[in-house]
Image (tube, rainbow, N blue to C red):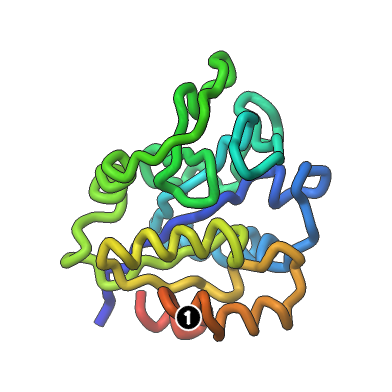
Amino acid sequence: MSQNVQFISIDLQNDFASEGGICYNFRPSVQFVKVTLFPYLFERSMVASEIVSDYRQPRAGDDRDCCRPGEWGYNSILPDDIRKGSQWVKSMNSPVWIREGIGDPDRTPGEPYPDPGGFNDWLMDHIGDKDEVDMVVLFGLTADCCVLSSVQELKWRGFEVRVLSEATDVRSGDQDEKEKFLSSPPFSFWGKSIGWDELKRSI
């Protein structure tokens, strides 16, 4: 019996996912999402919600200046035909952190601040009520940073969360490091990974 499975893509932007990006490392998961996951979703008229980043300075505690709206590095590799509704744009690792002027190339960005209520509203519009969703599947970059932060926020809100193992990587791209991370604390405190074959049996 099929389940109500919702997908969320995390930070699949050129600065992270494409050669030439400011924060790019080779990560096998990017090829997997392009060659396997995206076509699978498209062929079945399935969609994925999307969280992306606006990492312009100023950002206390993180001196990176990337994913600048209006520039190539900000653009997502998630195809428009499988994107569900509007993107949620964050300004720090956790998706609850936003900023004034977020995502707008014509506005000077403000300092990041938390907006948990806004994120709750976006989840309700794009994912649904936690009691009506069997599983939220996250994929994207990176497992040991922004994906983990999103897992935490969803878990604290009562969702059953899985990370599609083939469709994410740690920052280094090292596969042994990824497998160890996904099977150990701190990740295992909040979420679980799921393999592609197991996931397909659930949807």
Residue 104: x %, y % from top left: 52, 22
Q: Residues within 10 Å of mark 1 (few under 14, many from 20)?
A: few
Relative to 140, is 182 above or below? below
The residue drawn where x is 79% and y is 61% is 26
Left or right: 100 in relation to 6:
right
Q: Is residue 107 visible?
A: yes
Three-letter code for the amino acid on which mark 1 is drawn: Ser
Q: Specify the quadrant of the image occupied by residue 125.
A: top left
Residue 64: x %, y % from top left: 71, 40
Left or right: 121 in relation to 40:
left
Q: Residue furthest left?
A: 131
The residue identified by callout 1 is 188
The residue drawn where x is 17% and y is 67% is 131
The residue drawn where x is 76% and y is 74% is 174
Q: Secondary structure at mark 1?
A: helix
Left or right: 2 in relation to 25:
left
Relative to 175, is 130 above or below? above
Q: Where the C terminus falls, by quadrant? A: bottom left
Q: Is residue 39 visible?
A: no
